[in-house]
Amino acid sequence: MRCILVFGMLAATACSVKEIRGDCPCYLQVTFADTETGGEARLLGWREPSALFRETVRIEDCTPWVHPVEKGFLTVTACKGIRESVLETHRVGIPAGREADSLYAGFAEVDATGEIARAEIALRKQFATVFLDIRKKASELKDYAFRVEGNTSGFDLLDYSPVPGLFRCEPKARDGESIVTFRLPRQADDSLTVTVRAGEGVPATFPLGKYIAALGYNWKTEELQDIYVAIDLVNGLVDLRVADWEEGMVFPLVEI
């Protein structure tokens, strides 16, 4: 559907005085708070127990995007950046073996009981990138293997709530880099672990989720912040910091 409001169309389709007002649709107008980013977004209108619409739109064209809906209350949600994840109903699921996508999403509760309703969607960062440093040179890091596991495999577009399920990925450092990065979805608990193995040696597993929880990180915030983790395997210490925070914390390295 074109992302343009044609007032003539509204006038032509408006109910006459003789018609039953309850049968008239509500014309939903959707805009994005930041159109400068542009690109495609998936737009979903949801009223239990099913979707009212599912559309792919170009953000910069939605000035606004207009769609007739049956009158009532509904949730409008949008997301941008789905690549490996799977969108089912109103949940974004991460396949086992994959990290979270660089996904931005937003939602709005809408009162569409009148003839026109408006919803403005602000897309917020729905992933936290973890920068993992085990204090090894790039030439040494190629001999290490990493596995990240947890109990949250996605999130709900209607309220950002985590979706339970197996999360597992095996990140690798890029050539010439001494930092390993991976993206996490919103977490439901502190079960997240990271396993480090050097060559054919015995793997060591650390409770990353518990370290993050002890730092006071809020997985329910509207926009997730990135996390910086430095593991000193020799001295048995973990230095944990969050982007834009003035202070971090140092923990004794505990193997589980």
Image: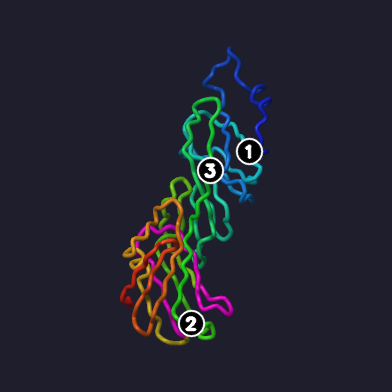
Q: Which residue is mark 1?
A: 63
Horizontal and vertical percent position of residue 199: 47, 86
Q: Residue at x 52, y 21 (%)?
A: 22
107 falls in the magenta region: no
Foreground mark, 3 or 2, reads 3
Foreground mark, 1 or 2, reads 1
The magenta segment: 171-198
Q: Which residue is mark 2?
A: 144
Please say if 193 is above or below 107.
below
In the image, what residue type sits under mark 3? Ile
**Residue 235 located left or right of residue 184:** left
Please say if 198 is above or below 223.
below
Q: Which residue is mark 3?
A: 121
Q: How is the model colour-coded?
A: rainbow
The tag earlier along the polypeptide, 3 or 1, is 1
Horizontal and vertical percent position of residue 219: 39, 56
In the image, what residue type sits under mark 2? Tyr
Q: CA distance from mark 3 to mark 1?
A: 12 Å
**Residue 253 located left or right of residue 197:** left
- Label 1: how many Cα within 10 Å (few below 14, some 14–19, many 20+): some
Q: Residue at x 49, y 56 (%)?
A: 93
Answer whether labels 3 and 1 touch (C-beta < 8 Å). no
The tag earlier along the polypeptide, 1 or 2, is 1
Q: Out of 38 and 98, give the one closest to the viewer.
A: 38
192 falls in the magenta region: yes
**Residue 32 located left or right of residue 206:** right
The C terminus lies in quadrant:
bottom left
Main secondary structure of the magenta stretch: loop
Horizontal and vertical percent position of residue 35: 61, 46
Secondary element type, mark 1:
loop
Q: CA distance from mark 1 to mark 2?
A: 50 Å
Answer whether labels 1 and 2 touch (C-beta < 8 Å). no
